[in-house]
Image (cartoon, helix red, strand yellow):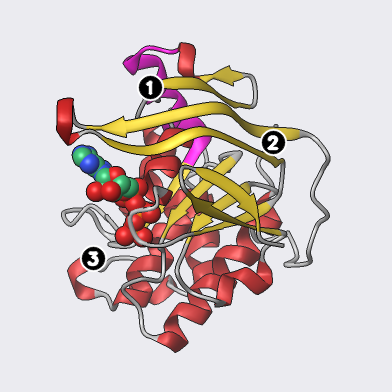
Amino acid sequence: MTPPNIAETTPQRTPATPTLLVEARGVAMRYGTGELTTGVLQGLNFAARGGEFVVIVGRSGSGKSTLLNLLGGMDQPLAGDIRVGQALLTAMNEEQRARFRRRAVGFVFQSFNLLPTLSVAENLALPLALNGLPGQQRIPQMLARLGLTERAGRYPNQLSGGEQQRVAIGRALIHTPPLVLADEPTGNLDEDTARQVTALLCEMIRETGSTLVMATHSSEPRALADRVLRLQQGQLQEER
Ligand SMILES: Nc1ncnc2c1ncn2[C@@H]1O[C@H](COP(=O)(O)OP(=O)(O)OP(=O)(O)O)[C@@H](O)[C@H]1O
Ligand SMILES: [Mg+2]
């Protein structure tokens, strides 16, 4: 797949393709051992199509982060299968999953997680370098798209929270991964900034055609999502 030229794509909403991109079947996950065991996911099923935006809601501790970590290949479930595109994550070893994550997944975290010793432009370039992908010329385009051209040479600690999260969004998308996972991406931002960051992330995944799975407590993203699912008692239910 040729990555779309970010500068040339328009922020119009492209309809989700009917192709299944992510599929989880009968997933079980628990933490701890013996009497201290916490059952988190129990026979959970999930599916998302290419280009779809799915919001996961649920009370604190219901297992949203646990689920995102499994979908992104950061962890292995106790039981069940997880597939992303052609990759059966649950049949992979650690090294294979690391390679899969690097290439196929973009992560956006609540706490931004930028590398403090790299500038904004260098943070954005990292996924391209790690994957041996060309495309350095995409950095100025991405900076412009994020409204951060003037901040290219700054370091993360010289940016506001909203600016840091915009860099993180750019970094998650620069290598056009098919899957983007966002865990409470606006949890550390004020209301106005949260709205802007949510809109930007949503627009950008519509441009790249990536599937976005977002865990959130905020109401804002629900209106923009194609589907909202609630995680409770270890399983997902359609909320709308
Ligand atoms: N590494 C871990 N070791 C032990 N227990 C864990 C670990 N990670 C999560 N848990 C437990 O698993 C449950 C689900 O946690 P998880 O972080 O997935 O919830 P969440 O829905 O993301 O919550 P929040 O909305 O507060 O972010 C919680 O009871 C939590 O204490
Ligand atoms: Mg969480």
Residue 166 lies in what quarter of the image?
A: bottom left
- Element under disc 3: helix
Q: Residues within 10 Å of mark 1 (few under 14, many from 20)?
A: some
Q: Position of residue 84 (x, y in %)?
A: 59, 28
Q: Position of residue 151 (x, y in %)?
A: 34, 73
Residue 101 falls inside the magenta stretch: yes
Quarter occupied by the N terminus: top right
Is residue 11 toward the left or the right of residue 156 in the image?
right
Q: Main secondary structure of the magenta part?
A: helix
Magenta region, residue range:
92-105
Relative depth, front residue between 152 and 174: 174
Picture layout, residue 22 above or below residue 110: above
Sequence-earlier tag: 1 or 3? 1
Q: Are marks 3 and 2 in contact (CB under 8 Å)?
A: no
Q: Residues within 10 Å of mark 3 (few under 14, many from 20)?
A: many
What is the C-alpha distance between the residues marked 3 and 2? 30 Å
- Element under disc 2: loop
Sequence-earlier tag: 2 or 1? 2
- Element under disc 1: loop
Instruction: For residue 121, say whether it is visible.
Output: no
Relative depth, front residue between 68 and 51: 68
Q: Residues within 10 Å of mark 2 (few under 14, many from 20)?
A: few
Residue 200 lies in what quarter of the image?
A: bottom right
Q: Which mark is residue 2?
A: 2
Which residue is denoted by mark 1 in the rendering? 78
Picture layout, residue 233 above or below residue 26: below
Which residue is denoted by mark 3 in the rendering? 156
Is residue 193 toward the left or the right of residue 226 in the image?
left
What is the C-alpha distance between the residues marked 1 and 3? 37 Å
